[in-house]
């Protein structure tokens, strides 16, 4: 999937300017940038929640103009949310089951698929808990299970490790790196922690002020003078 | 077994209620019970949409009105219709249909109207859709109050066969419980509840929210339309203002007091509110204590109901049921 010259303007204010980005199946692509750089806006564009003012989003060689978010998931583009956004009054299993049912499975099959996914994420024992009562890290896992069940072609993860301790974060990130191998999908991951993103990404993009500042392998990005001066300088 | 325990428990409760009433055998009690059970069909119908979708509707009593008049058109004696309802189509004027056919057709009529209305308003955001349902109620009321050749306008329609007693009402309540439960555990029900909890996340789980809401709206209007038809066959008399603000307030209170988010809440709320209203009605008539006669002022019913509603919203916002479904007590492991 790719973004081609995507720009988004909010009442004249440019949130994204001429962004080009590609994610292939089987790779983990990092997306970094300071707060307000437009990372979440970009993910919203790539999943149908934000219509580009100009430019196109292409999924499997199809132009997605006019697609609503459910169509993106049906075409194989899944996402997680920074705020979790679980279905709070439903059980953990039901949370994950919804995706399968939304994609046309009957409840029994969707439930079985959900249990397999929860098992893989190590939270099958909490399947009957109400989602609203979960601890923060488990909430994140349910969000990931919900995105990965009936494996999509691409999964876009908006800061999956935000608010976790270092140890918890690392555990989660190692899980993320195993996604392409296990499910054959491409991963786009927004992450603040520089060390983490350098470790997990096959390629990464640096977004700043709504523009792509640099893109390439972690080594190339780290060596890029524009990135060092604009963003990484203080961090590394 | 555990999957069906909620509808089974609720149905068991209703059958016990019907049994107790027929043991006591008081005509007044049977009347109150039947009216309550018919309202319960309506409240369960409203719950099917409101509880699962999280979108409030102020217009469902409009569907009740549509159902009630539809059954009147089909079951009144032709001689009466030909004189009083001269604008009715000839098929209705010249024929009468049996009760089951009329009730089913009344539900379908309400569902048909809901389909058209829903296509227009289900794409609106939750609050805008709620206000649009209220506009619908006002429109139905105006049309039915003024379309004299078809509805009799503001004068009453009389002579509808009064075939609905407590046991028939119990039967329909059980049917409504089964239907609402089947809907809520269905694929559509699951997707709709997901959209109630989080619209954005539901969409990214491939849920087509507008379509799910529309399906629920139509199914819910069907049950409410059936409830309207039962009401007509219970009272035998129809006036348009029976299906307006007062009844909307009572039925929504029942739903809120019981808890918007569970079928058990719809059932329990109808029982609780009926009990409150009946007690207050009795107190309005007055009690004789020795030599003195004590009575609450007229209007206490409405005030009491309003207070009950406010208290529930303040102290138990998810209703008497707490948003949970009835279940056998489980041993703690």
Image (cartoon, grey):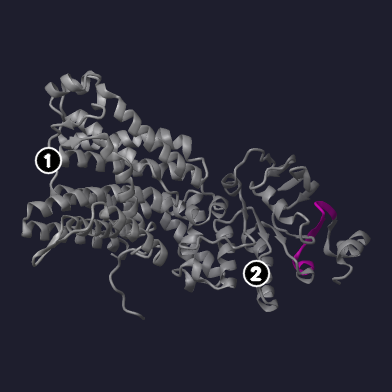
Disc 1 secondary structure class: loop
Q: Percent from the top left, x then y, of residue B277? A: 24, 56
Q: Nearer the viewer, residue B136 or A217?
A: B136
Residue at coordinates 26% horizontally, 23% vertically from top-left?
B148
Q: Which residue is at the far bottom?
A: B333
**Which label sits on residue A175?**
2
* Residue A2 shown left or right of residue B298 in the figure: right
Locate residue B106: give its quadrant: top left
- Magenta stretch encompasses residue B100: no
Q: How many marks?
A: 2
- Magenta stretch encompasses residue A211: yes
Locate residue A231: give its quadrant: bottom right
**Marks 1 and 2, how far apart in space?**
65 Å
Q: Percent from the top left, x then y, of residue A125? A: 48, 74
Q: Percent from the top left, x then y, of residue B310? A: 38, 60
**What is the chain letter for disc 1?**
B
* Residue B246 shown left or right of residue A179 in the figure: left
Q: Which residue is at the far right?
A: A225
**What is the chain letter for disc 2?**
A
Q: Nearer the viewer, residue B285 or B21?
A: B285
Which stretch did the figure color magenta? A197-213
Disc 2 secondary structure class: helix
Residue at coordinates 14% horizontally, 56% vertically from top-left?
B18
> For mark 1, does the 10 Å Cα neighbourhood hold few (<14), some (14 to 19), or many (20 or more) residues?
few
Locate residue B82: give its quadrant: top left
Q: Which residue is mark 1?
A: B163
Q: Percent from the top left, x then y, of residue B128? A: 50, 43
Residue at coordinates 30% horizontally, 29% vertically from top-left?
B144
Residue at coordinates 45% horizontally, 65% vertically from top-left?
A91
* Residue B51 shown left or right of residue A10 in the figure: left
Image quadrant holding the C terminus of chain A, namely: bottom right
């Amino acid at each position: 999937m790719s973004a081609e010259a995507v720009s988004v303007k909010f009442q004249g204010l440019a949130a994204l300017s001429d962004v080009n980005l590609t994610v292939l199946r089987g790779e983990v692509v990092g997306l970094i940038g300071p707060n307000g750089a437009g990372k979440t806006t970009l993910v919203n564009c790539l999943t149908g929640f934000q219509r580009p003012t100009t430019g196109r989003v292409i999924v499997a060689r199809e132009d997605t103009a006019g697609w609503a978010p459910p169509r993106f998931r049906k075409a194989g583009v899944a996402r997680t949310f920074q705020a979790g956004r679980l279905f709070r009054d439903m059980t953990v299993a039901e949370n994950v089951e919804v995706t399968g049912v939304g994609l046309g499975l009957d409840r029994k099959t969707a439930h079985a698929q959900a249990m397999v996914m929860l098992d893989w994420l190590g939270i099958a024992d909490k399947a009957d808990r109400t989602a609203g009562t979960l601890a923060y890290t488990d909430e994140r896992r349910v969000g990931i299970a919900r995105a990965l069940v009936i494996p999509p072609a691409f999964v876009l993860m908006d800061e999956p490790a935000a608010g976790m301790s270092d140890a918890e974060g690392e555990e989660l990130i190692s899980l993320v790196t195993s996604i392409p191998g296990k499910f054959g999908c491409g991963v786009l991951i927004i992450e603040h922690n520089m060390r983490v993103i350098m470790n997990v990404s096959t390629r990464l993009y640096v977004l700043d002020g709504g523009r792509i500042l640099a893109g390439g392998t972690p080594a190339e990005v780290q060596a890029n003078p524009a990135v060092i001066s604009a963003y990484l300088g203080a961090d590394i | 077994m555990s999957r069906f325990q909620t509808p089974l428990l609720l149905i068991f409760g209703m059958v016990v209620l019907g049994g107790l009433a027929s043991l006591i055998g008081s005509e007044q009690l049977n009347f109150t019970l039947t009216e309550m059970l018919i309202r319960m069909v309506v409240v369960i119908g409203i719950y099917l949409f409101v509880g699962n979708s999280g979108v409030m509707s102020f217009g469902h009593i409009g569907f009740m009105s549509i159902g009630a008049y539809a059954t009147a058109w089909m079951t009144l004696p032709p001689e009466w219709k030909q004189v009083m309802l001269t604008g009715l189509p000839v098929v209705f004027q010249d024929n009468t249909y049996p009760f089951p056919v009329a009730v089913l057709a009344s539900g379908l009529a309400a569902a048909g109207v809901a389909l058209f209305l829903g296509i227009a308003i289900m794409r609106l955001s939750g609050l805008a859709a709620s206000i649009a349902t209220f506009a619908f109620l006002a429109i139905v009321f105006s049309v039915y109050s003024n379309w004299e050749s078809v509805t009799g306008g503001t004068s009453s329609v009389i002579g509808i066969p009064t075939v609905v007693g407590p046991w028939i009402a119990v039967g329909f309540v059980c049917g409504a419980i089964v239907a609402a439960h089947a809907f809520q555990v269905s694929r559509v029900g699951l997707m709709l509840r997901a959209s109630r909890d989080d619209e954005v996340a539901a969409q990214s789980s491939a849920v087509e929210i507008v379509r799910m809401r529309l399906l629920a709206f139509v199914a819910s209007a069907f049950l409410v339309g059936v409830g309207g038809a039962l009401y007509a066959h219970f009272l035998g008399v129809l006036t348009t203002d029976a299906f307006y603000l007062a009844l909307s307030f009572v039925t929504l209170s029942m739903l809120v007091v019981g808890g918007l988010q569970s079928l058990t809440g719809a059932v329990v709320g109808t029982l609780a509110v009926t009990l409150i209203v009946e007690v207050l009605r009795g107190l309005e008539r007055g009690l004789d204590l020795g030599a003195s006669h004590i009575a609450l002022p007229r209007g206490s019913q409405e005030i009491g109901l309003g207070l009950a509603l406010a208290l529930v919203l303040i102290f138990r916002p998810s209703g008497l049921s707490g948003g949970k479904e009835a279940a056998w007590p489980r041993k703690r492991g």
